[in-house]
Amino acid sequence: MRVFLSDLHLEDPASARFNTFATVMREEAKTAEAIYLLGDLTEVWVGDDDDGPLASQLRAVLSDAAAECTIHVMRGNRDFLFGTRFASETGVGLIDDPLLLDDDTLVAHGDGFCIDDPEYQKVRALFRSEAWQSEILGQTLAERRELARSLRTESRESNANKAENIMDVADREVARVVGAAGAKRLIHGHTHRPGVHTHDWGRRFVLGAWERCGWLARQRRPDTDPQLECFALTYS
Ligand SMILES: [Mn+2]
């Protein structure tokens, strides 16, 4: 069994969201072969040297889970600075976006499919460039935290002015990427529009963001479709 989560946007380690994440990781790690975190695990990641409470508790939860089962982490558009130090300190493996898991199942964060938003794709390319990342990582933690705050404000203001469909995936880009990989099943997040879609090439499973509830997709065997599950965010 494989379990997929995305778009948790973790921010506050004292929140019900974080507590539920910790519970899900602990419980699923007991029985899953692998857990895939498909991007935007955190609302922001300013670098592996982050010593704040969220970063510390996140490392602890992931280390415990990684001792029980294989944990794969894909970077999203919020946590694109997850690096090799974070991976080695927690025991998780960083994976490419998109990634073909076996003959049929492709996983991705999802933002790469949103090509109807060229402004966003430009920023995405910049954030993913090695030159920009190494320049940012050369700044102090305090400077990076400040930069993250201003980028979030900018992104909120810019998204508020965009038509809804522009921020969704473009079907033609999904078909192109899935076709190139030869897959017939795609699991992704990012759009915060959970659902199952049938296309010419197969089926697309969209994970929800952890807002009113938490979400996961559970795939019992590699050759079967996953099931989407949603559950309450609790402190228990
Ligand atoms: Mn995203």
Image (cartoon, grey):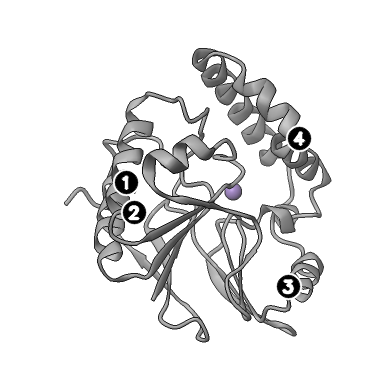
Above or below residue 44? Residue 212 is: below
Q: Are marks 4 and 2 in contact (CB under 8 Å)?
A: no
Cα separation, mark 4 vs mark 1, equals 30 Å
Q: Are marks 2 and 1 in contact (CB under 8 Å)?
A: yes
Cα separation, mark 2 vs mark 1, equals 5 Å
- The amino acid beneath tag 2 is Ala
Helix, strand or loop status at disc 3: helix
Looking at the rendered image, the quarter that the N terminus falls into is: bottom left
Q: 10 Å neighbourhood of mark 2: few (<14), some, or many (≥20)? A: many
The residue to which callout 1 is attached is 63
Q: Which mark is residue 126?
A: 4
Where does residue 181 sit, x and y in percent of width and height? Answer: 73, 72
Q: Residue at x 27, y 49 (%)?
A: 64
Helix, strand or loop status at disc 4: helix
Query: Left of 108 or right of it: where is 117?
Result: right
Helix, strand or loop status at disc 1: helix
Q: Residue at x 43, y 41 (%)?
A: 88
Which mark is first along the chain, 3 or 4? 4
The residue to which callout 3 is attached is 181
Query: Left of 223 or right of it: where is 89?
Result: left
Q: Residue at x 24, y 62 (%)?
A: 27
Q: Residue at x 40, y 66 (%)?
A: 34
Query: Left of 155 or right of it: where is 79?
Result: left
Where does residue 163 sit, x and y in percent of width and height? Answer: 74, 50
